[in-house]
Amino acid sequence: MPTTVTLIPGDGIGPDITEATIRVLDAVGADLVWDRQMAGASAAARYNDPIPEATLDSIKKHRIALKGPLETPVGEGYRSVNVALRKTFDLYANVRPAHVILHGGRFEKVDIVIIRENLEGLYYGAEHYIRIGDDPKAAAESIALITRYGSERAIRYAFEYAVKHGRKKVTLVHKANILKYTQGLFLDVGREIAKEYAGRVQFEDRIIDAMAMQLVLKPENFDVIVTTNLFGDILSDLVSGLVGGLGLAPGANIGPTAAIFEAVHGTAPDIAGKGIANPGALILAACLMLDHLGDIARAERIRAALHSVIDEKQVLTRDLGGTASTSQFADAIIARL
Ligand code: NAI
């Protein structure tokens, strides 16, 4: 029986990289059927709703989605559809693996997986303006909600991930020296859970600012990183920059009843419509989806083909230093399958 997957091509470069990804999945013979749905700016323009009911119903039914990037207006307009999808489907763990694919850069030995708590912290969505006198926006307040429950399941996911994938160490990143209650709770929970894995997985903690520096100086010292929502968002872009850029950074949003796979990057408005975006991140996200579905052999074949295209350096998109188009890059992968 083929698996039906909700497919959301998304905005900006989304449709181009989605098309390339589907061609690669077809070429490898993945047993998938697509239920195409809309979300983001394209859905807002067509249905006046950035997350139409039909899209939510489709994910509810199939419990698995592959999603292109979605545009979120800055400062005003509708709230982030990505955040809403994570909340709706309780996608508490955001998994973002990054290892060196494009050799010859500054680092050769980076192999890091960031597990980001995906629902709480400053992205919880409790924000409001405070009126003072005549000024309705005299101040603004965001609440960083951290719960023991939310921290526990994200941190436990990180330790279980380490055990399952034979990884040695979990580094918990926080700012508990200043934010003693919220970040302190996350750290306390981490220390408790770490005891259960003593002897199997090493544990250490780092303060976010020092961690940012250490990641740039000695990224090979890190293995699995677990952190709160905002820090995880920032560190995963930083880490993708260490290994060849956003064009090769995939992500998985995992919950108890659904999983959504996507690229870490956004809609890349500066190159949208030009056919030059790197589809690698979404292709690698599709590989994470195949892993999740148990089709590890096909995922590995795609990864090997992508790695060999990049190693040969003949057909590379512009972000990787080449001149190839999105579809030429996909064709090169398909030729090696
Ligand atoms: P971005 O990730 O779209 O772009 C940052 C830079 O990376 C740009 O120079 C872009 O050209 C480049 N880039 C990104 N992906 C690329 C690819 N596949 N190939 C080649 N170059 C690539 O971030 P930005 O500009 O901050 O955000 C644009 C929009 O995307 C915003 O509306 C934002 O809210 C949304 N966004 C959506 C995400 C999602 O749906 N998961 C994640 C991040 C941003």
Image (cartoon, rainbow, N blue to C red):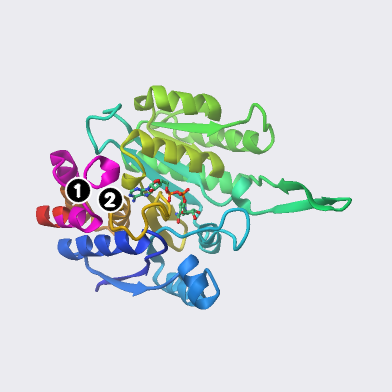
In this picture, is 255 found above or below 143? below
Q: Which amino acid type is marked by label 2?
A: Gly
Count of numbered marks: 2
CA neighbours of label 1 inside 10 A, class few (<14), some (14 to 19), many (20+): many
Q: Pinpoint residue 334: horizontal percent, then vertical percent.
A: 14, 57
Quarter of the image containing the N terminus?
bottom left
> Could you say which disc has been placed on residue 280 in the image?
2
In this picture, is 73 found above or below 303? below
Q: Pinpoint residue 267: horizontal percent, then vertical percent.
A: 42, 56
Is residue 207 visible in this depiction of the protein?
A: no
CA–CA distance between discs 2 and 1? 8 Å
Is residue 318 rendered magenta in the image? Answer: yes
Q: Is mark 2 within 8 Å of ligand 1?
A: yes
Whether the residues at callouts 2 and 1 have beta carbons within 8 Å, the answer is: yes
Quarter of the image containing the C terminus?
bottom left
Sequence order check, earlier mark of 2 and 1: 2
Q: Main secondary structure of the magenta part?
A: helix
Q: Pinpoint residue 12: horizontal percent, then vertical percent.
A: 40, 60
**Camera-nearest residue between 86 and 148:** 86
Name which residue lies at 54% across and 35% down: 190
Q: Quadrant of residue 174?
A: top right
In this picture, is 165 found above or below 56? above
Q: Which residue is mark 1?
A: 306
**Camera-nearest residue between 88 and 328:** 328
In this picture, is 335 found above or below 192? below
Is residue 266 visible in this depiction of the protein?
A: yes
Range drawn in magenta: 307-331
Q: Quadrant of residue 199?
A: top left
